[in-house]
Image (cartoon, grey):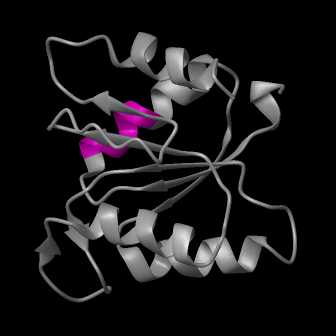
Amino acid sequence: MILSELKVLLVEDNVYKRIDIRNALSLYGIKNVICVNYLQAGLEEIYKSMNAEPISLIITDMHYPIERVGEAVPDAGNQLIKRLQSEDINIPVIVCSSVPYQIPEILGTVWYDERRDLNRDIKELLDKL
């Protein structure tokens, strides 16, 4: 797969983390990144893309709001993953979180931590595509 052709959905409510992830993706030529900051918007983008240019990869945090107005929910990312599975939507998922999750059903997890090399960690998972 040619990385520069990927269409990525980034579900992240922290603006600084979103910038870091976008910068890491752009290092590998990935410019087509749709950013949303709550679960419902992410689902809408997924459904919309199914009738047009499909999303090739989802990068999600685990803790963000479900709807536009509301508090962040600790398992929002899990809700997204479970929804994809229950609807048989096969888009690779990378979790990028400050907690090093181990989720067997996804492509992988990037531990977002200042001691880690975000660019290298993302590249290792992109190489699995």
Location of residue 109 with respect to 24 vertically, above or below:
below
Q: Quadrant of residue 27?
A: top right
Asked whether residue 79 is drawn in magenta, I would say: no
Would residue 89 appear left or right of 94 to someone viewing this image?
right
Give the farthest residue toward the right: 52
Would residue 3 appear left or right of 97 to someone viewing this image?
right
Q: Give the percent coordinates (x, y) of residue 37.
A: 36, 67
Q: Residue at x 15, y 73 (%)?
A: 73
Q: Give the percent coordinates (x, y) of residue 69.
A: 23, 89
Q: In which quarter of the image is the C terminus?
A: top right
Marks counted in the figure total 0
Residue closer to the observer: 85 or 14: 85
Q: In which quarter of the image is the N terminus?
A: top right
Residue closer to the observer: 81 or 61: 81
Secondary structure, magenta segment, majority class: helix
Location of residue 18 with respect to 25 vertically, above or below:
below
Location of residue 6 with respect to 20 vertically, above or below:
below
Q: Give the percent coordinates (x, y) of residue 53.
A: 85, 62
Asked whether residue 20 is drawn in magenta, I would say: yes
Residue closer to the observer: 110 or 81: 81
Location of residue 126 with respect to 109 vertically, above or below:
above
Q: Give the percent coordinates (x, y) of residue 66.
A: 29, 81
Q: Which residue is drawn at 58% across and 81% down?
A: 44
Q: Which residue is drawn at 55% across and 29% down?
A: 25
Q: Residue at x 32, y 85 (%)?
A: 68
Would residue 38 appear left or right of 81 to someone viewing this image?
left
| Range covered by the magenta-colored residues | 16-21
